[in-house]
Amino acid sequence: MLNLEYLTNQDGQPTAVVIPIEIWRQLLPFENASLENLSNAIEDYCLNKAMDEGKKGPLYSQDEAKAFLED
């Protein structure tokens, strides 16, 4: 499980997210990255995590997959 922390202002409203440095270095292994690089890295990270989770599930035939999606 990902351990995120939130920084808040005086009113208790979240203003920033703190993530573990190991995750940050996986997302952006280089310095001076642009906002676009960060956005793409986060998207790739999330897609990879979703694919890893999907691999743990059952494999369906085409007909089984269609039936599953229809439910």
Image: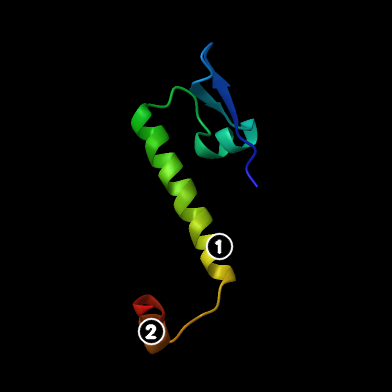
Instruction: Locate the C terminus and report the quarter of the image it occupies.
Output: bottom left
- Residue type pointed to by label 2: Ala
The structure residue drawn at horizontal position 49% and vertical position 47%, both measured from the top left corner, is: 45
**Which type of secondary structure does the marked residue at label 2 adopt?**
helix
Judge depth for marks 1 and 2 and give the one in front. Answer: 2
Q: Which residue is mark 1?
A: 53
Looking at the picture, how far across and down is residue 29, in whole percent?
53, 34
- Circle 2 residues within 10 Å: few <14, some 14–19, many ≥20: few
Q: In the rendered structure, are the residues bearing label 1 and label 2 in contact, judged by CB atoms less than 8 Å apart?
A: no
Q: By what rule are the colours in the image chosen?
A: rainbow
Q: Is residue 48 above or below residue 31?
A: below
- Circle 1 residues within 10 Å: few <14, some 14–19, many ≥20: few
Q: Is residue 62 above or below residue 26?
A: below
Looking at the picture, how far across and down is residue 16, in whole percent?
50, 23
Image side of residue 20 versus residue 38, left or right: right
Closest to the observer: 8 or 58?
8
The structure residue drawn at horizontal position 52% and vertical position 66%, both measured from the top left corner, is: 54
Looking at the picture, how far across and down is residue 13, in whole percent?
49, 21
Seen as rendered, the residue at the extreme front is 11
**Which type of secondary structure does the marked residue at label 1 adopt?**
helix
The structure residue drawn at horizontal position 55% and vertical position 62%, both measured from the top left corner, is: 53
Looking at the picture, how far across and down is residue 34, in whole percent?
37, 26
Instruction: Determine which of the numbered discs, if any, sits on residue 14 in the image.
Output: none
- Real-space CA distance between mark 1 and mark 2, rounded to the nearest whole angstrom: 21 Å
Q: Which residue is mark 2?
A: 67
Mark 1 vs 2, N-terminal side: 1
- Residue type pointed to by label 1: Glu
The structure residue drawn at horizontal position 63% and vertical position 33%, both measured from the top left corner, is: 20
